[in-house]
Image (cartoon, rainbow, N blue to C red):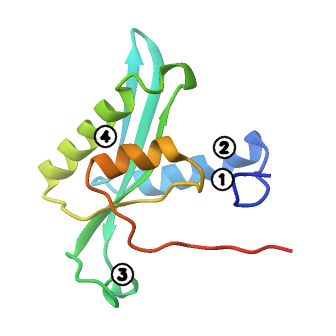
Amino acid sequence: MGAATGEFADDETSWRVRSASYREWLADPRSFLLIAREGDRPVGYAVTRVMESGPEWRDAWRMPPTMAELETLVVLPELRNTGLGTRLLDAVEGELERQGITEVIVGIVAGNDGAQRLYERRGFRPRWIVLSRSG
């Protein structure tokens, strides 16, 4: 079982579905992928989707017309807590600032306390919580 979220898909299925989403999101020239490297070796990456904030967002909150979602920020396990995630987030925020985007959301899996601490240190606050039930 995944961290309070249900059963995770196998890696092959997960990557097939996720990579298709990445291709779709990155077709928008405002969206972007950043890759962190140690020499030639990729050691982390961030995918940020830029989109219009439609009525499904603005029905409850005042939102600018364009927003971003940090879809993925990943660092190799052996390099976590070294500042690499912070540097990736710095680069994401720099690109969003360059584009004039001020509204950014990110979702995290329940129990990923390290990610939650990272985002909260950067000013992210819970706005809504999604609960699920299966079975």
Q: Nearer the viewer, residue 81 or 102?
A: 81
- What residue is pinned by disc 2? 15
Q: Residue at x 75, y 41 (%)?
A: 12
* Closer mark to the observer between disc 1 and disc 3: 3
Of the two numbered discs 4 and 3 on the same chain, state the one appearing first in sequence.
3
Q: Nearer the viewer, residue 111 or 42?
A: 111
- Check whether the beta carbons of the residues at disc 1 and disc 3 lie within 8 A of each other: no
Tag count:
4
Amino acid under disc 3? Trp
* Closer mark to the observer between disc 2 and disc 4: 4
Q: Considering the numbered disc 3 on the image, is that residue within a helix, a strand or a loop? A: helix
Amino acid under disc 2? Trp
Quadrant where the C terminus is found in the figure: bottom right
Q: Which mark is residue 57?
A: 3
Amino acid under disc 1? Val
Q: CA distance from mark 4 to mark 1?
A: 24 Å
- Check whether the beta carbons of the residues at disc 2 and disc 1 lie within 8 A of each other: yes
Q: Considering the numbered disc 4 on the image, is that residue within a helix, a strand or a loop? A: helix
- What residue is pinned by disc 1? 17
Q: CA distance from mark 2 to mark 4?
A: 22 Å
- Give residue 14's position: percent from left, percent from top: 70, 48
Q: CA distance from mark 4 to mark 3?
A: 23 Å
- Give residue 45's position: percent from left, percent from top: 43, 34
Q: CA distance from mark 2 to mark 3?
A: 28 Å
> Is disc 1 surrounded by few (<14), some (14 to 19) or many (20+) residues within 10 Å?
few
Q: Considering the numbered disc 1 on the image, is that residue within a helix, a strand or a loop? A: helix
- What residue is pinned by disc 4? 89
Q: Considering the numbered disc 2 on the image, is that residue within a helix, a strand or a loop? A: helix
Of the two numbered discs 4 and 1 on the same chain, state the one appearing first in sequence.
1
